[in-house]
Amino acid sequence: MTDERMGDALWIVLERLPRGAGIVFRHYALPQGERRAVYERVRAVARRRRLTLILAAPPAQAAAWKADGVHGRSPQRALRPLIRSAPAHDRRELRSARHADLRLVSPVFPTRSHPGAPALGPVRLGLMLGSERGGIVALGGMTHRRAQALRNFGIGRWAAIDGLIRT
């Protein structure tokens, strides 16, 4: 997950992502022209490194910007060949995102992205998901160590912003 707060660390993180990983490009606060310029730089790295690039934007914009996928709560379901990812912060949002290829469930742990928001924690995350594990991506306060702990709950995918930046 990209974020303006990453600054120049973004470029280091992109180079460290493992093959097969993906990027959800957000950078919401940038003016449109600047956002597009940063996106194109990210896209060049993603192509060179064979990373999947998902744009947090309306589906038409994701297609126009030649993203591999689209992230958001768009009601459009027939987005092939775009990968579809959607946020889910509670059971209702999880159900409404059933059509998405990836459902980013958050916040699993306390996070700077949503200060003060109650975190699910592993047990409540497991209860919220019930038997659903398909396409689930844990987000919110994630680190490599926390991701390893979630494997006990059948969750093998995770995303991060700060958790990928070494301080």
Image (cartoon, helix red, strand yellow):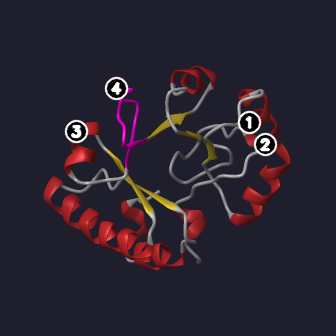
State the image coordinates of residue 134 (x, y, percent, origin top left).
66, 37
Q: Secondary structure at mark 3?
A: helix
**Relative to 157, 150 lies left or right:** right
Q: Quick one: label 2 or label 3, which is nearer the N terminus?
A: 3
Q: Secondary structure at mark 2?
A: helix
**To which residue does mark 2 refer?**
122
Q: Are marks 2 and 1 in contact (CB under 8 Å)?
A: yes
| Spatial CA span between label 4 and label 3 | 10 Å
Q: Secondary structure at mark 1?
A: helix
Relative vertical location of residue 162 with respect to residue 74 in this rendering, above or below: below
| Spatial CA span between label 2 and label 1 | 5 Å
| Spatial CA span between label 1 and label 4 | 27 Å
| Spatial CA span between label 3 and label 1 | 32 Å
Q: In the rendered picture of this protein, how many numbered marks are placed on residues?
A: 4
Which disc number belongs to residue 125?
A: 1
Q: Residues within 10 Å of mark 1 (few under 14, many from 20)?
A: many
**Relative to 114, 157 lies left or right:** right
| Spatial CA span between label 2 and label 4 | 31 Å
Residue type (three-letter) at the residue carrying disc 2: Pro
**To which residue does mark 3 refer?**
60
Which image quadrant for residue 49? bottom left
Q: Nearer the viewer, mark 2 or mark 3?
A: 3
| Spatial CA span between label 2 and label 3 | 35 Å
Magenta part of the protein: which range? 69-83
In this orientation, which residue lies closer to the viewer: 128 or 69? Answer: 69
Q: Quick one: label 4 or label 3, which is nearer the N terminus?
A: 3
Which image quadrant for residue 61? top left
Q: Quick one: label 2 or label 4, which is nearer the N terminus?
A: 4
Which image quadrant for residue 135? top right
Which residue appears at 85% of the width and 48% of the height? 152
